[in-house]
Image (cartoon, grey):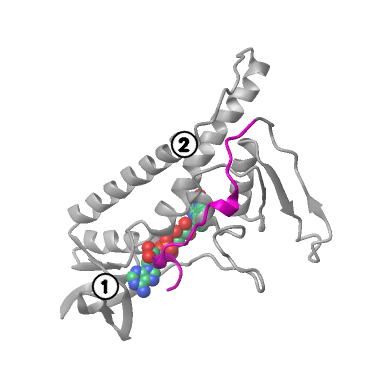
């Protein structure tokens, strides 16, 4: 059995911030994470989306350059290079975060944690971990589907799958026009995909569909979504 002042379940943005703050205040801290520290934001959210949006911005820059007297054309998108750059950015940030936690003397306990008492966790492969001051639950969230719409990782994919695609779809329907949906729609549109976004706030019965034309049309290297089975990593499917 291990005992710490502060025990945190979940090493995402919330958990890491709490851990670093606790360590800063001189507490002994354990951070329990079943996947990778950094959580959604670093691996499946903010960072990979912003990396891809930067690529989209570069595309837009090429297309709009003519208006500024800077004439250029997009010859080809090597999407494998885009993906490699995205992964490189995520990996560097991940390594940086790991180093930061180590430097702050936060003990990262790798494994699935289960609450077994008011200030107690059972961590797979580690055993019982007890907090003397506080147990912080920072287990975050995972993508959720709609009734009757099964996320199969092929035709129906979540934002997790979308960010990890290693090809550009020719056409895509983005369901949900919150920040995540709009960012993905904007990215694909800039890269030449035909993006359809059901406008369901104004029309909940899906009676009206907005189909923006692709921002620019050009021959994107694309493979059939059906031939690319994507599975959500087990660590992301349930909490
Ligand atoms: C596509 C996308 C883009 C986004 N872009 C932005 C943005 O630009 N700006 C912004 O502010 N926010 C953005 N967000 C939201 C942001 O990612 C979340 O608000 C943030 O990650 C929430 O942090 P969290 O620590 O609460 O949870 P999470 O980041 O989900 O972390 C929870 C962690 O807990 C771990 N965990 C869960 N259960 C257990 C268990 N039982 N045992 C051990 N570990 C466990 C998980 O593995 C995970 O690492 C985006 C989200 C998405 C999906």
Distance, label 1 to label 2, CA atoms, is 38 Å
Asked if the stretch drawn in magenta spans residue 182, the answer is no
Q: Which residue reaches farthest front?
A: 227
Q: Residues within 10 Å of mark 1 (few under 14, many from 20)?
A: many
Q: In the image, which residues are magenta? A: 219-239
Position of residue 198 relative to residue 193, above or below, is below
Tell me the number on the disc at residue 82: 2
Asked if the stretch drawn in magenta spans residue 223, the answer is yes
Residue 215 visible? The answer is yes
Q: Looking at the image, is mark 1 or mark 2 nearer the viewer?
A: 2
Residue 138 visible? The answer is no
> Please, what secondary structure does the residue beneath circle 1 have?
strand
- Residue under the point 27% across and 48% down: 95
Q: Which residue is mark 1?
A: 7
- Residue under the point 24% across and 56% down: 101
Predominant SS along the magenta part: loop
- Residue under the point 38% across and 61% down: 12
Q: Which residue reaches farthest bottom?
A: 117
Q: Name the quadrant containing residue 127.
A: bottom left
- The front one of 225 and 174 is 225
- The front one of 116 and 36 is 36
Quick check: is the Cβ at mark 1 less than 8 Å away from ligand 1?
no
Q: Is residue 81 left or right of residue 3?
A: right
Tell me whether the residue at label 1 lies in contact with that at label 2, contact meaning CB atoms closer than 8 angstroms: no
């Amino acid at each position: 059995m291990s005992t710490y002042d502060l025990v945190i379940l979940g090493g995402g943005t919330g958990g890491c911030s709490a851990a670093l703050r606790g360590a800063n205040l001189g507490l002994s801290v354990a951070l329990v994470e079943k996947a990778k520290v950094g959580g959604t934001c670093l691996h499946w959210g903010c960072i990979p989306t912003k990396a891809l949006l930067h690529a989209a911005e570069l595309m837009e820059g090429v297309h709009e350059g003519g208006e500024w007297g800077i004439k250029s054309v997009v010859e080809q998108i090597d999407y494998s290079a885009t993906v490699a750059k995205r992964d490189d950015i995520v990996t560097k940030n991940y390594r940086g975060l790991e180093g930061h936690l180590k430097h702050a003397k936060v003990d990262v306990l790798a494994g699935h944690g289960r609450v077994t008492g008011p200030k107690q966790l059972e961590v797979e492969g580690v055993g019982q971990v007890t907090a003397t001051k506080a147990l912080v639950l920072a287990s975050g969230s995972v993508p959720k589907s709609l009734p009757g719409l099964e996320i199969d990782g092929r035709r129906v994919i979540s934002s997790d799958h979308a960010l990890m695609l290693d090809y550009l779809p020719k056409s895509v329907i983005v369901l949900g026009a919150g920040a995540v949906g709009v960012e993905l729609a904007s990215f694909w549109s800039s890269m030449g995909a035909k993006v359809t976004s059901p406008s369901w706030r104004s029309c909940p019965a899906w009676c009206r569909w907005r189909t923006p034309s692709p921002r620019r049309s050009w021959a994107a290297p694309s493979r059939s979504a059906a031939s690319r089975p994507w599975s959500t990593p087990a660590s992301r499917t349930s909490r």
